Image (cartoon, grey):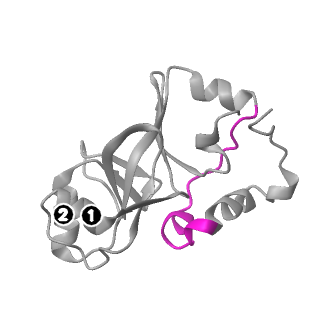
Amino acid sequence: MRDPNFERTVILLCQRDEDGAVGMVINRPHEITVGDVAGAAKVAPPRHEEEVTWWGGPVSPGTCFVLWRGRAEVGEGWTIGDEIAVSPALERLERLVQIGRHFHLVLGYSGWGEQQLESEIERGSWLYTEADPSIVFDTPIEERYDRALGLLGLTASTVWMQPIDE
């Protein structure tokens, strides 16, 4: 894929259906902190306010998603697997801050139109594996790419990708 937005990225796929797909990059830090977002949303600062947010993708960079270990409520967002919850709801952010629960914030997202992701997977632009909560929540951001490849029995040196500048 000749898109620098997605070079060496790990995408958490939240929704995939006949209309397209929505996901977010989970291995690129953003310069904006959790405290910055909480302040802009007029939410009390969380105890991990100095933690950086993640850059989720090039679509709607002003959109914020909350990720936490657990399950999203029906109609609130997505539950991926059994342990990964994602919500765009400000109310969820407020509740997590109130109860002192750790969460991550992702700014922007990645989106694909009808059959676009399927076509890119067929061309070999993406590799796919089940979501692993330990990569999302326990693995340092700079190690997630290698850990995700490891789930497929691969390493970065065994995966050939066409250089972006060709």
- Magenta stretch: includes residue 141: yes
Q: Residues within 10 Å of mark 2 (few under 14, many from 20)?
A: some
- Magenta stretch: includes residue 135: yes
Left or right: 45, with 77 as reference point: left
Image x and y of residue 35, in percent? 26, 68
Q: Quick one: 166 or 59, which is closer to the camera?
A: 166
Q: Start and end of the magenta stretch? A: 124-142
Task: Kindly identify the amino acid type of the residue bearing the numbered disc 2.
Answer: Gly
Q: Quick one: 19 or 29, which is closer to the camera?
A: 29
* Residue sitting at x 72%, y 57%: 149
Vertical comparison of 70 with 120: above or below: below
Q: Main secondary structure of the magenta part?
A: loop
Tell whether label 1 touches label 2 (CB within 8 Å): yes
Q: Quick one: 148 or 156, which is closer to the camera?
A: 156
* Residue sitting at x 58%, y 41%: 5
Circle 2 sits in a helix, a strand or a loop, which is it?
Answer: helix
Q: Which residue is mark 1?
A: 36
Image x and y of residue 69, in percent? 38, 66
Left or right: 49, with 11 as reference point: left
Task: Kindly identify the amino acid type of the residue bearing the numbered disc 1.
Answer: Asp
Circle 1 sits in a helix, a strand or a loop, which is it?
Answer: helix
Q: Which residue is mark 2?
A: 39
Q: Residues within 10 Å of mark 1 (few under 14, many from 20)?
A: some
